[in-house]
Structures are given as C-alpha cells and as structure tokens.
Image (tube, rainbow, N blue to C red):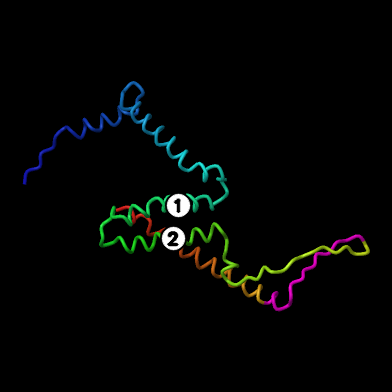
Amino acid sequence: MKLIATDTFFQSFKKMINSTKPWYFGFWKNLYYDFKRYSTNLFKYHKIVKKMYPWDGASIYQMVKFQLEILLPNIENGMEEEVSRDKKVKDIKRLIELLDNYEKENYADRCGYDANWNFYFEEKKDGLVEMLTDETEEQKEKNQKALLASYELEKQEIAEIGELFKKIPTWWD
C-alpha cells in the first residue's frame, strides 16, 4: 500500500487560520452563526437564565432537565437506533424525574411528613415571645422519622443523578 501525502491539509489549515482574521469572509460568517445561535439560545433558555446565580447549582439541573425534555421525544420517536433506544429513554425519563424532585424539594412529603399542624406566638410576661405549635407528640415522632428518611432519600437520589449524569455522553451517539 502506497501512502501519498497531498497539500490539502495545509490548505484547510490555512483556511481555518484565515477564518479568525476579520478581513476574511469566514470570520464574519462564523460570527454571524455564533450570534444567531446565541440569540436563539438566549430566547430559548430565558426562563432559566434570568434565575441563574453564579453560586447556585440548581439552575444547572434546570437547564439539563429542560434540554432532556427536548431530547426525549426525538429519541422516543425514532431518531435513535432501536437497539439502545429503550434503555436511553428509561434513563432519560428517570433523570428528568429525579431532577424534578430536586427542583420541587418534595422529599419530606414523599416520606410521609404530616404538615397538618399550625404554630402560633404567645407573649410572655417579661416581654419575650415564644413560638408554640399544636402538633401532637405522635405527629412530632412521625415527622422526625419522615425528615430523617427524606434526608436519606435525597442523598440517594442525588447519588443516582450523578450516576445518570455519567451516561449523558452516550445518549448523543
């Protein structure tokens, strides 16, 4: 087998380098498409972006969930090979469910927390105010157990989110 090298690599390389200089058409073409994509994405993700803070990781989960909700129908409706489609769909649906639970913070409710009690303030004789509840002892015990179980459930689901995040690169093959 004879290997022949041509100069097309260097021509392509030169064209790529020239596209970074403003006096070439390629520079303006790339800038146009970058700006177009930026504008589309800004409009598409504006609900998430307007709530983003640099110290908040929840917005990253919201963006992933939003993107997966866009991806899921495309994979389900045949834009994916049948061999691996069902497993990917199952994983994506599970990740969307976990991210939704994380966003809603419904772990305590799912573990049986009883929020059917009220609190009120009572003023003492020395001018201080004490907060009291009409929660029964049975409710207190049940709610303590539910809160401990919800903490464990949250840890387990966040670990599962991490495991499913590792699979994300395989969903776009």
Q: Judge left or right: residue 38 versus residue 105.
A: left
Q: Is residue 79 above or below residue 13?
A: below
- On the image, the x and y values in percent for residue 74 come to 33, 52
Per the rendered image, the range of residues in magenta is 127-141
Q: Is residue 139 above or below residue 24?
A: below
Residue pictured at 30% horizontal, 60% vertical: 85
Residue beneath disc 2: 95
Residue pictured at 63% horizontal, 70% vertical: 113
What amino acid is found at the position of numbered circle 1 in the picture? Val
- On the image, the x and y values in percent for residue 50 come to 55, 42
Q: Earlier in the sequence, mark 2 or mark 1?
A: 1
Could you say whether the residue bearing mark 1 is in a helix, strand or loop?
helix
Report the front residue among 13 and 93: 93
Residue pictured at 34% horizontal, 56% vertical: 171
Q: Judge left or right: residue 123 versus residue 7.
A: right
- On the image, the x and y values in percent for residue 62 come to 50, 52
Check disc 2: other Cα within 10 Å, few if <14, some if 14-19, many if 20+: many
Report the front residue among 20 and 28: 28
User: In the image, which disc is placed on residue 64?
Assistant: 1
- On the image, the x and y values in percent for residue 167 come to 37, 59
Residue pictured at 65% horizontal, 71% vertical: 114
